[in-house]
Image (cartoon, coloured by chain):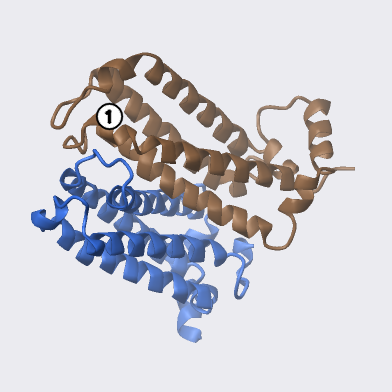
Amino acid sequence: MGPTGFIETGGALQAYAAWVNTTWLHSFANYKWAWATMETLHFLGLGLMVGTIGVLDLRLMGFLKGLPVSSVQKLVPWGIGAFVLNTLTGVVFLAGAPYQYLYNLAFQMKVIFMLAAGVNVLIFYAGTWQRAQNIGAGQAAPWAARIAGAVSLFLWIGVMYWGRMLTFFRPPFVVPPK
Amino acid sequence: MPLLASLERTGFATWVREAPTIWAYATILFLHTVGLGFVVGANVAIDLRILGVARDMPLAPMRRLFPWMWAGFIVNALSGVALLIADATTKLGNPVFGVKMAFITLGVVNMAWSKRKLFDNPEELDRVPLSAHAKRVAIMSLILWIGATTAGRLMGYLGPVSGLESLN
């Protein structure tokens, strides 16, 4: 399978990865049970994100219509907490094995999907939310909100997809080239 | 165990493990992850609500999350069987796998029986604050699903390493 990603900035990426390998975070990531612990937290964060942000997405899409939209929104701070947890643990992985990720198509796609999910959520709360928040039990959300929910669910499942593909797109070198 | 070794050599197990395509092992592993998200996520959403998060969210309509839990569970049972027979000797020889199965069995019993019973009992469901029993069911659910997820992760770190080359 594809050994490298499509984003290649030549020396800059290489220099960055080499620097990362000298940081304390790199040492921490490779210390005893740190990686396994971070991975476990990363998966628990994944479940919590589906249970909060995913549930809001489903409600906006028209499932779980018995739940008023504003009430489901109260789950979202927990989803943000889970997102922060997964970003932090993700940074540990990146610091721990930069060459495994930076040149990996799956990692690059994962980041792009996360950025797209970020744009989607900003657009949603900047506009559509004004109308969506008053949607009560039994009511359908406006089309813009339904689409925002579907796009969010698609992108986050995509993030899971690319996350899982990391191992299969892993570049042939995982040790820094000399 | 010769039975497990022969299971690993079946055409299907070999395909799951060795097919040079993204649609075999990689995709099955992805499905197992999405299934985890829905089983754990839907359970946790209800647990958080029972334990006082998003208090103004009505609990009764959350019963509509049960089909999502079951869908996630079925996806994971099927993908899990595929992943298991592809590496049967190693996985069944790993005590952490037994721990994971125990957590999942108890988690499903808790979700299908205790939680379900709670949702079939409007008197208990509408009580403010919710009964101590409901809270016990929610806390048990959180412990069991966190346990199942953790055990699943740690299977890669504890116990025997697979002797099947394509899995290393």
Q: Colour of chain A?
A: brown
* Quadrant holding the C terminus of chain A: top right
Residue positioned 61% across, 42% down in the render: A88
Chain in blue in the render: B
In the current view of this chain or complex, which residue is farthest to the top? A127
Name the one closer to the observer, A57 or A104. Answer: A57
Residue positioned 63% across, 71% down in the render: B161
In the picture of the structure, the residue carrying the numbered disc 1 is: A70
In the rendered image, the vertical position of residue A6 relative to residue B52, given as above or below: above
Name the one closer to the observer, B79 or B113. Answer: B113
Q: Chain of mark 1?
A: A
* Quadrant holding the N terminus of chain A: top right
- In the rendered image, is residue A57 in sight? no
What x and y, as percent, mark residue A173?
77, 46
In the rendered image, the vertical position of residue B167 relative to residue A60, given as above or below: below
What x and y, as percent, mark residue A63?
21, 36
Mark 1, residues whose alpha carbon is within 10 Å: few (<14), some, or many (≥20)? some
Image quadrant assignment for residue A17: top right
In the current view of this chain or complex, which residue is farthest to the bottom? B1
Left or right placement of residue B26 versus residue A13 in this view: left
In the rendered image, the vertical position of residue A47 relative to residue A148, given as above or below: below
Left or right placement of residue B51 versus residue A100 in this view: left
In the current view of this chain or complex, which residue is farthest to the right? A178
What x and y, as percent, mark residue A155?
44, 32
